[in-house]
Image (cartoon, coloured by chain):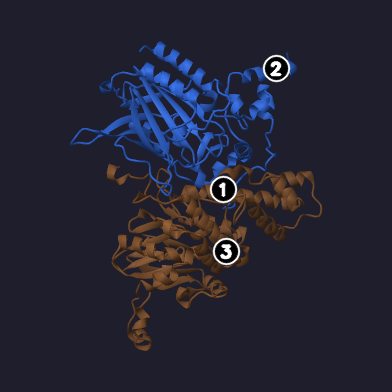
Chain colours: A brown, B blue
């Protein structure tokens, strides 16, 4: 490895690093609190309470022309090339100017596409401003019927369920912030800048409208909040999220990723929040979430109450790494959501024997 | 310095490092602060090992580990629920208690690499070399190649900073090195999650690692100080010895090819084998086999220190080992 290629370990290269962590965490907290109640609240609340002026973006080159931009909301993925720019997730609205500045450092081509991995405001807040800074390729009857305005903004892709959630927000989002191109099936493909881009819908995971974005040529997966390195997974039950769907999504990420011959690098993973990752980081996280789910499921099947489950400390081994005792998404809330969903799916057996318990417990 | 002198210094160093001379041992952070006892010990070693900067030692070569130190843990492997001598917290204990060895049957975990704070403790061939700028002959990096998992480690010597918090983490981490006399000091961050002891005692991806390498003739002493704010309550200090090989080794002894396969046909994809907390099927096996008190087997910072032997001795007086069957 040549020295100049190795400013950072692994595949990524540090381009800049000046981001204050506390602001990011606070902003994420505000975002996700609001996510449970509605993304509009995220936008309003976070914008009112955060000093976004202090936020400085950190750009990481991930692979080829794919970059990760870390700011105060969910991580943004940027794909550049001769056909233009694709932006996956747009963070908070007040950061739009800084996001656009970051994009301009990477490419002078027009922004053609925005993709929303899900509906939360910390991932969609910049939709309007960033879309308006872009342009759509269009011609023929489209321009003829609509006029030049048809090309005035970038297009915004999301799953239809994400759009359905976004249009229900109160106060309503401006129409220019809403996805323009949705799909209702399991996958959407797009070839852009010579990059085969696949968007896989993950039903009922973090929300009910999550997308995994796979840049096949660069071999990068942008996960939205289906994977983070900073906290226990936020299961947004109010917007259709489930723990089982979340675990399935994590396993789907693992199905896409392929490590190098030394079991790191290879397919790189841009998380919804946190640092640049690879398959093994997702494995650790998948193991953690699955183990916690399995424990609570077993306790539910044994007929334990929520308080009894909490007394067993089912997350103790992972708490120093992922727990929050205060804020938008506490460990207690994480346990409660799993408990309720397991109780609904696996009601306790009317009779159970120690042998049966042992058999289940050791699975 | 003779080998005997170095060994003597190390004995004193370890005794000093492990001695509980201070009531509270502050956590060390990368690049500064920390444990006064350990710092004093390192300073002592530095004095012993010091020589003019122009005479910095040459670490390049092929090195073979010696396993006399902590041999049962390093070669046959640790027994389940043996946490003795590790400064772990309750979270680390639960992590270890839940770890089912069947976990490594999962294809995605079969080729799991040992992180740099652990990899030198196992069987391996180690090659060290220096990379220099061809124009200036300045040292750019010192490199280590471990045959185990075919890991190449770069220790940057050109003054570059460690990357920021959003950079990826790797098995070997990001390392920078410097000389203190003839002692080579390496500081590592950006590590992946790995093992502290490969019976389920984990090291988190927030751990940092400081190493001290001292050469005495053809013997290389490696001392590692691991700080993990997630799973450890105090720094963990361990050491290993290596002997310089006079000959290179056949090429194939440097290779480690790992290709994951499905090992258990009935295993459902996505299953993660684990024991429920408190329901480990081999609970008590380790302490029963070795006639140790449970409080020793469970580990913790106090089990690292010499005076802990007294607690065990008192327990043994009250709980004498039963006579062996058949005698």
Q: Are marks 3 and 1 in contact (CB under 8 Å)?
A: no
User: Which image quarter: residue A139?
Assistant: bottom left
Secondary structure of the residue carrying tag 2 is helix
Q: Are marks 2 and 3 in contact (CB under 8 Å)?
A: no
Query: Which residue is identified by label 3?
Result: A34
Question: Measured along the vertical axis of the image, is residue B238 above or below residue A70?
Answer: above
Instruction: Give the CA distance from mark 2 to mark 3.
Output: 58 Å
The residue depicted at 30 percent of the width and 27 percent of the height is B60
Q: First in sequence: mark 3 or mark 1?
A: 3
Instruction: Give the CA distance from mark 3 to mark 1.
Output: 20 Å
The label number, if any, that marks residue A322 in the structure image: 1
Which chain does the numbered disc 1 sit on?
A: A
Q: Can you see residue B136? A: yes
Secondary structure of the residue carrying tag 3 is helix
Query: Which residue is identified by label 2?
Result: B314
Question: Measured along the vertical axis of the image, is residue B116 above or below residue A131?
Answer: above
Question: Measured along the vertical axis of the image, is residue A68 above or below residue B118?
Answer: below
Pick whichever, B67 or A149, lies toward us.
A149
Which chain does the numbered disc 3 sit on?
A: A
Q: Is residue A225 left or right of residue A87?
A: right
Q: Can you see residue A219? A: no
Disc 2 crowd, CA 10 A, few/some/many (<14, 14-19, 20+): few
Q: Is residue B166 left or right of residue A209?
A: left
The label number, if any, that marks residue B273 in the structure image: none
Q: Farthest bottom residue?
A: A145
Same-chain check, marks 1 and 2: no
């Amino acid at each position: 490895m040549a020295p100049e290629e190795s400013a950072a370990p692994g595949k990524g290269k540090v381009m800049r690093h000046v981001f204050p962590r506390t602001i990011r965490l606070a902003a994420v907290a505000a975002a996700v609190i609001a996510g449970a109640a509605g993304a509009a609240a995220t936008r309003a609340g976070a914008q009112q309470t955060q000093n976004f002026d202090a936020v400085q973006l950190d750009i990481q080159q991930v692979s080829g022309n794919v970059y990760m931009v870390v700011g105060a909301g969910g991580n943004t993925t940027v794909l550049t090339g001769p056909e233009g720019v694709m932006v996956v997730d747009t963070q908070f609205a007040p950061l739009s100017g800084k996001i656009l500045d970051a994009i301009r450092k990477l490419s002078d081509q027009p922004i053609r596409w925005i993709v929303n991995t899900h509906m939360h405001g910390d991932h969609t807040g910049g939709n309007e401003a960033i879309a308006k800074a872009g342009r759509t390729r269009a011609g023929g009857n489209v321009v003829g019927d609509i006029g030049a305005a048809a090309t005035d903004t970038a297009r915004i892709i999301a799953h239809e369920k994400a759009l359905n959630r976004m249009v229900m927000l109160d106060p309503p989002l401006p129409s220019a912030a809403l996805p323009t191109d949705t799909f209702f099936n399991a996958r959407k493909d797009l070839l852009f800048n010579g990059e085969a881009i696949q968007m896989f819908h993950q039903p009922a995971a973090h929300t009910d409208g999550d997308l995994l974005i796979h840049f096949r040529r660069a071999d990068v997966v942008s996960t939205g909040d289906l994977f983070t390195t900073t906290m226990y997974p936020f299961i947004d039950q109010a917007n259709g999220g489930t723990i089982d769907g979340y675990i399935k999504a994590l396993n789907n990420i693992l199905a896409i990723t392929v490590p190098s011959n030394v079991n790191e690098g290879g397919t790189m993973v841009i998380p919804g929040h946190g640092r640049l990752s690879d398959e093994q980081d997702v494995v650790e996280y998948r193991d953690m979430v699955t183990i916690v789910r399995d424990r609570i499921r077993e306790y539910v099947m044994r007929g334990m109450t929520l308080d009894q489950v909490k007394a067993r400390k089912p997350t103790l081994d992972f708490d120093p790494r992922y727990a929050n005792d205060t804020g938008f998404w506490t460990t207690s809330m994480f346990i409660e959501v799993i408990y309720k969903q397991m109780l609904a799916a696996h009601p306790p057996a009317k009779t159970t024997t120690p042998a049966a318990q042992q058999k289940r417990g050791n699975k | 310095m003779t080998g005997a002198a170095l060994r003597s210094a190390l004995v004193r160093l370890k005794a000093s490092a492990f001695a509980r001379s201070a009531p509270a041992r502050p956590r060390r952070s990368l690049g500064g602060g920390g444990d006064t006892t350990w710092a004093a010990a390192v300073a002592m070693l530095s004095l012993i090992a010091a020589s003019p900067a122009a005479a910095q030692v040459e670490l390049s070569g092929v090195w073979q580990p010696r396993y006399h130190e902590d041999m049962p843990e390093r070669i046959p492997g640790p027994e389940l629920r043996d946490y003795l001598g590790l400064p772990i917290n309750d979270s680390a204990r639960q992590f270890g208690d839940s770890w089912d060895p069947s976990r490594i049957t999962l294809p995605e975990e079969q080729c799991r690499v040992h992180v740099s704070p652990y990899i030198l403790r196992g069987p391996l061939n180690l090659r060290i070399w220096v990379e220099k700028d061809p124009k200036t002959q300045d040292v750019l990096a010192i490199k280590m190649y471990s045959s185990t998992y075919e890991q190449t480690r770069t220790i940057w010597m050109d003054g570059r900073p460690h990357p920021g918090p959003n950079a990826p983490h790797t098995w070997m981490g990001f390392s920078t090195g410097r000389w203190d006399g003839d002692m080579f000091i390496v500081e590592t961050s950006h590590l992946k999650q790995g093992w502290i002891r490969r019976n389920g005692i984990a090291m988190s991806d927030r751990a940092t690692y400081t190493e001290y390498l001292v050469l005495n003739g053809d013997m290389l002493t490696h001392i590692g100080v691991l700080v993990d704010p997630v799973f450890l309550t105090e720094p963990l200090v361990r050491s290993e010895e290596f002997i310089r090989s006079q000959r290179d080794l056949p090429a194939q002894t440097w290779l480690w090819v790992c290709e994951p396969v499905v090992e258990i046909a009935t295993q459902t994809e996505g299953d993660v084998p684990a024991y429920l907390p408190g329901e480990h099927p081999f609970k008590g096996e380790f302490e029963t086999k070795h006639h140790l008190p449970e409080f020793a087997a469970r580990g913790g910072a106090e089990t690292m220190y010499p005076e802990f032997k007294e607690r065990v001795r008192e327990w043994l007086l009250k709980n004498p080992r039963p006579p062996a069957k058949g005698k």
